[in-house]
Amino acid sequence: MAKKSYDYLFKLLLIGDSGVGKTCILFRFSDDAFNTTFISTIGIDFKIKTIEMQGKKIKLQIWDTAGQERFHTITTSYYRGAMGIMLVYDITQEKTFDNISKWLRNIEEHANEDVEKMILGNKCDMDDRRIVSRERGEQIAREHGIRFLETSAKTNINIEQAFQYLAQDILKKELNKDSEEPSNNIHVHDQKDKKGGCCG
């Protein structure tokens, strides 16, 4: 069998309202390109990028979802198995920020419990048209105990960092899992024996 060219495969998901720049963020990160023509994502699209972290090769499979309601049913099935989710809003559009709580509820309903989350306030290069303050973004992230960054796909602000942070958080979890597994099994048996002894 051919040897895998990576140590870990992380499935990441970009979600948020239509037009907030999810696709632009993905392209900036994967191809270091920015496209000003807006093409609405039809359903779902993904890119792959391999990064190195702590001596491990990590293959990121990044899914870009459509924000429109009519694609909603398709996208919910993609929450399953996602290890990291980026919620994106547009700092110049109040409604996209208001909907963050709706997206967070979706994650709770459809994603794995231990999924890593991150909120991105995109288009921070358009400060003159800003409606949502940075503090409000930080506050909602704090309330939910998740990371927050303001990004700009256009001028390439914090895009690389956002993916690095998310991958880092997932890797930490995976490495913990790997090191815990053997000792966990022993622990389970111990409990069983004790149970058998006292209540059996």
Image (spheres, grey):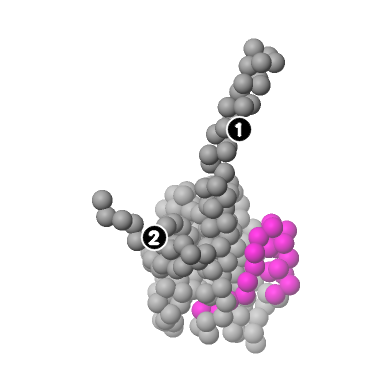
Report helix, strand or loop for mark 1: helix
Report x, y in % for residue 10. 46, 57
Per the rendered image, the range of residues in magenta is 134-153
Residue at 58%, 59% (x, y): give it.
169
Q: Is residue 44 magenta?
A: no
- Where residue 162 sits: x, y (%)? 56, 70
Q: Which residue is mark 2?
A: 6
Residue 191 image offset from top left, x and y in percent: 63, 26
Residue at 52% x, 47% y is 178
Q: Nearer the viewer, residue 187 or 34?
A: 187
Instruction: Name which residue lies at 71% across and 68% down.
Output: 138
Amino acid type, label 2: Tyr
Residue 76 seen from this side: no
Whether residue 93 is situated above or below residue 10 in the rendered picture: below
Contact flag, marks 1 and 2 (Cβ < 8 Å): no
Which amino acid lies under the numbered mark 1 shown in the image of this protein? His
- Please tell me whether mark 2 sits on a helix, a strand or a loop: loop
The image quadrant where one finds the C terminus is: top right
Q: Is residue 144 highlighted in magenta?
A: yes
Name, please, the residue furthest toward the bottom.
128
